[in-house]
Image: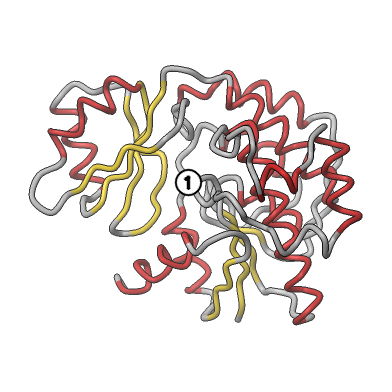
Amino acid sequence: MKAYVFPGQGAQAKGMGANLFDEFPELTNKADCILGYSIKELCVEDPLEQLGDTKFTQPALYVVNALSYFKEIQSSGVKPDFVAGHSLGEYNALLAAEAFSFETGLMLVKKRGDLMSQARGGGMAAIVNSSKEEIEAALKENGLNNVQIANFNSPKQIVISGMKEEVEKFQPIIQQGRTIFVALKTSGAFHSRFMQDASEKFNTFLQGFIFANLNTPVISNVTAMPYKNGEIVDNLSQQITHSVRWTDSVDYMMQQGVTDFVELGNGNVLTKLLRDIKKAK
């Protein structure tokens, strides 16, 4: 069985999608109209150095992921048995399952990026070679109550999120022996309770859309289980404040018989995580 998986924030890089925009001129033009700027120029040249700003990162990744998917379908004609995406990438999974059109998905992502970019004072860091239990115990013992786990990326990599000063205080505490602390470039405490305001505003925005029933199982970041019809508004709202359960999502698909995972989009972030998840089996 085959699954298509789509990366999220962190996969962006100047030059991404360079070979795609001219192949899909109609969709590229639609993206420009929705966004109010040239998506090709942003992704390929990034003249104003905006690609690292979540307000621009999210639409850019969504478009490149989407065009990558359409090209894959054009060339192979193979529809996947499952689809999943990491954080922002979940919108591309829903697009692939025909929950909404390319244009609707981009409008959702644009709003999501706008709301999340308003978050300030937050920080995130990747913790390598430490477990959930070790991280949570260390946070509790040191009174760092404004930090929580944001992403379960692989058995080797967990991302924390919270108030920036507390995230920074955690580095010398957890970085012992084989454990590595890597600060991430982000202005907000994404996938944490500190995004509640953005989540509520996004929920209100989502109420204005009608979503189709899914034609392919989409694995939810929030539950690590397939979406049920009618859950899109709740899942996408909760995703902003809840942990990304990527390891559990991949485990679920493997248990269903998926052996072929194809990453569509820029880079190979998820391919590397998949390798670590499979190694732990």
Judged from the image, the secondary structure of the residue bearing numbered disc 1 is loop
In the rendered view, tell whether residue 134 sits above or below residue 48.
below
In the rendered view, tell whether residue 44 sits above or below residue 162.
below
Extreme-left residue of the structure: 177
- The residue shown at (36%, 43%) is 159
| Quarter location, residue 169 | top left
Query: Which corner quadrant holds the C terminus?
Result: bottom left
Q: Position of residue 141 (x, y in %)?
A: 13, 28
Q: Is residue 66 left or right of residue 182?
A: right
Q: Position of residue 192 (x, y in %)?
A: 45, 30
The residue closer to the viewer here, 270 or 197, is: 270
Q: Position of residue 201 (x, y in %)?
A: 68, 21
Q: Residues within 10 Å of mark 1 (few under 14, many from 20)?
A: many
**Residue type pointed to by label 1:** Val
Colour mode of the rendering = secondary structure
- The residue shown at (44%, 66%) is 251
Q: How many numbered discs sit on the rendered protein?
A: 1
| Quarter location, residue 218 | bottom right
| Quarter location, residue 213 | bottom right
The residue closer to the viewer here, 10 or 257, is: 10
In the rendered view, tell whether residue 10 sits above or below residue 48.
below
Q: Is residue 144 left or right of residue 178?
A: right
Q: Is residue 137 left or right of residue 250?
A: left
* Residue that numbered label 1 is attached to: 244
- The residue shown at (44%, 28%) is 189
Q: Position of residue 88 (x, y in %)?
A: 60, 45
Query: Which corner quadrant holds the N terminus?
Result: bottom right
Extreme-right residue of the structure: 26
In the rendered view, tell whether residue 246 sits above or below residue 149.
below
- The residue shown at (68%, 27%) is 202
